[in-house]
Amino acid sequence: MKIGLTKPTRVPRAGKIAAGSMALVLLVACSGCFSKEDPGPLKIQDSTIASAEQPVSERAEPTAQRVPYPVGGQGDPSQNWGDLYLPGGVHKRGTVPMVVLVHGGAWHHSIGASTFDDYARAISARGYAVYNIEYRRVGSGGGWPTTFTDVAAAFDHVKQLMAEHPELSGRAVAVGHSAGAQLATWASTRGDSQLVPGLSAPKFRPSRIVALSGPMDMTFEATTDDHDLFHVMGGKPSQVPTNYSAVDPIQNLDPQIPVTAVHGTADSTVAWQNSQRYVQTLQARGGQADLKLLYGETHGSFLTYGSTHFNEVIDLITNGK
């Protein structure tokens, strides 16, 4: 086998090799040492390179802070906020992904964001920041269109949170349960619809959506005589059709955002066929959509720590599996 030499090469003694090699190293290392003035230590001109090598946040344990979000018109500081959970540890710039979490509760004031506190902590323990939002609901100043414009405003505020916390990567997953699944999905895929009074163009889009037990086809859900749905929408589809077309997830598709719909097969509150209809419609539009059926689970049983599919769903949210 030839190694590239066409004629024999004389090999010098070992001592001469060492000396020659050292001379070469010194020449390269000191190639800038022969100027008349010492240039001093090397300086990095691009500050982004320097900052990328240093952590921008360090926490001994996960923390939570309440952050208000602005709304158009008269807001309610007692409800227009989100709890921001930040994971513990040392984090460099742009390394921490986020989950935007929307609680359910039939759009009714009796159930609030505190019901998702433990779930937010479980997600944050996986290294995610979690933005668990509160919003006005039926019976506490919400209803049509306030509930929807509140959630849209909370989603728009994600851009500000990312600017304030440089460890956040800019990648976010929108997650909602039940009514929160409808709200999270619609807020993620909505356009600048004039059918919702006070709605502005979206400022934020998540990279992915996970809808848990959601009424993803609100017109189909209305066939079950869901009075909570009628209260938040201001009537039945036959009475306020433009309201439904404005915020119904299945009527506001964005094929560019992947969606995973998760539903228990024993759900008697919102039928799993609701998620199936949404997934099939999004797939027909060329979007990436998956249906994950949890055998034997009810409407929210898989949200309870220690339940059969608890870790599986958390994995799906944080790992995309």
Image (cartoon, grey):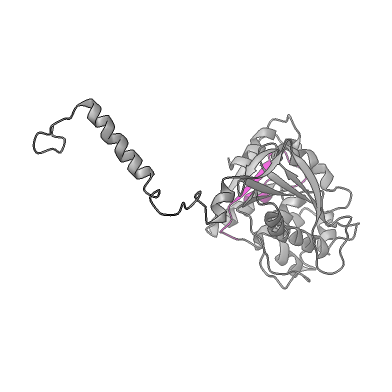
Residue 156 location, quadrant:
bottom right
Give left or right: position of 33 versus 183: left
Q: Residue at the spot x=38%, y=43% of the render?
A: 29
Q: Residue at the spot x=59%, y=40% of the render?
A: 319
Q: Residue furthest front?
A: 36
**Residue 300 % position (x, y):** 76, 40
Q: Residue at the spot x=56%, y=45% of the render?
A: 53
Q: Magenta segment, which residues?
A: 254-276
As drawn, 316 above or below 51: above
**Residue 295 % position (x, y):** 66, 35
**Residue 246 % position (x, y):** 72, 66
Residue 321 location, quadrant:
top right
As drawn, 39 above or below 193: above
**Residue 121 % position (x, y):** 75, 39
Give left or right: position of 117 versus 21: right
Q: Residue furthest top?
A: 14
As drawn, 268 above or below 143: above
Residue 191 location, quadrant:
bottom right
Q: Does the rendering let one see residue 237?
A: yes
Whether residue 281 is in magenta: the answer is no
Task: Give whichever of 193, 169 is nearer the camera.
Answer: 169
Q: Residue furthest left?
A: 7
Point out the image quarter for the N terminus. top left
Whether residue 269 is in magenta: the answer is yes
Q: Residue at the spot x=62%, y=61% of the render?
A: 253
Give left or right: position of 167 versus 85: left
Q: How many marks?
A: 0
